[in-house]
Image (cartoon, grey):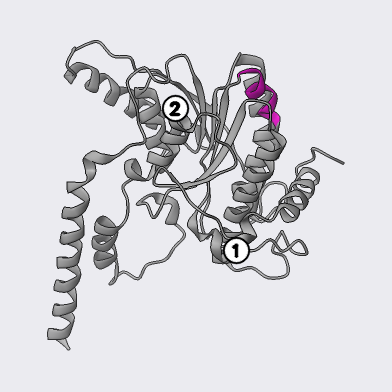
Amino acid sequence: MAVATAAAVLAALGGALWLAARRFAGSGRLRGGGDPGLMHGKTVLITGANSGLGRATAAELVRLGARVIMGCRDRARAEEAAGQLRRELRQDAECGPEPGVGGAGELIVRELDLASLRSVRAFCQEMLQEEPRLDVLINNAGIFQCPYMKTEDGFEMQFGVNHLGHFLLTNLLLGLLKSSAPSRIVVVSSKLYKYGDINFDDLNSEQSYNKSFCYSRSKLANILFTRELARRLEGTNVTVNVLHPGIVRTNLGRHIHIPLLVRPLFNLVSWAFFKTPVEGAQTSIYLASSPEVEGVSGRYFGDCKEEELLPKAVDESVARKLWDISEVMVGLLK
């Protein structure tokens, strides 16, 4: 038994090292970014930008010259992340080919709790009062496979944060996005949408709750929302696209319990097989900044390339019904 266990560990280690070598060899081929100054003069709002994918996305867009607003639930953590990013940007400028000269943009922290429609409305009111333009909105924040909980407004937490909070946020900022056109909306979904369905009889998961299926439902809702929004935005010069980042090493999985004895092997496997936040953020950065997708709308991307969706994710009747019900749930319609 001990020999078999050791062999399994060595095999996993060997596979991990092999894959890691392949990944490092290809690390120079990240394509989400662009030339310095590409985003100069543009204002970008990123939800959940204090860690993981959001932080990596914010860092790159600031390097490209954008003015990035970090919309985060925990203001203290967001201020800490912003301070770290500013220090990194200063170090990059000092170590660059022209020390002390850099085209980096600006970071602004604002409090936004997507589990509270009151917070979303207050945030948007502040945005509309203080921001003359919004060039890119990145709906990035999310919660993953949490125990059954409800938002401040009584919605199941994953559906409430991942879909409804962003649904209200986007709708309240649409006027600003339209007046800033050409502008872009980027929605972060997941490949796990494939395991979800939209059960209109139990959107709040009060009859039954499975944390995995409910996460997948919220990610399917992200895609249906994107496609319906793209239809409604035709002719406005505002585009909206949705993406999956792949499997990324972030704190999104904090609600997943991993037995203590398995953690070392899990950490090894995740180090080798999962994307880093920078790698996972490439498609968000690409959709937010690349001239290649100018005018492209209503599409689904992975690894900076368009991908096909399952039939249930392109069902126009379901997308319209979900939109109508969501409008009522968040109070846009009585």
Q: Which mark is residue 112?
A: none
- State which quadrant residue 15 falls in: bottom left
Which numbered marker is on residue 196?
1
Residue 179 highlighted magenta (yes or no): yes
Q: Residue furthest bottom?
A: 1
Residue 35 horizontal/vertical position (percent): 32, 22
Tag 2's secondary structure? helix
Residue in the picture at 14% in, 72% down: 10
Spot occupied by residue 301 in the image (x, y as percentages of width and height): 48, 46
Mark 2 surroundings within 10 Å by alpha-carbon count, few (fewer than 14), some (14 through 19), many (20 or more): few
Residue topped by disc 2: 291
Kind of residue indicated by mark 1:
Gly
Q: Which residues are magenta?
A: 172-180
Q: In percent of the image, x 62 and y 40: which residue is there?
A: 166
The three-letter code of the residue at mark 2 reads Pro
- Whether residue 115 is visible, yes or no, is no
- When the figure is inspected, residue 137 is found, relative to residue 147, above or below; the finding is above
Mark 1, other Cα within 10 Å: few <14 / some 14–19 / many ≥20? some
Q: Which SS class for mark 1?
A: loop
- Residue 189 in the figure: left or right of residue 276: right
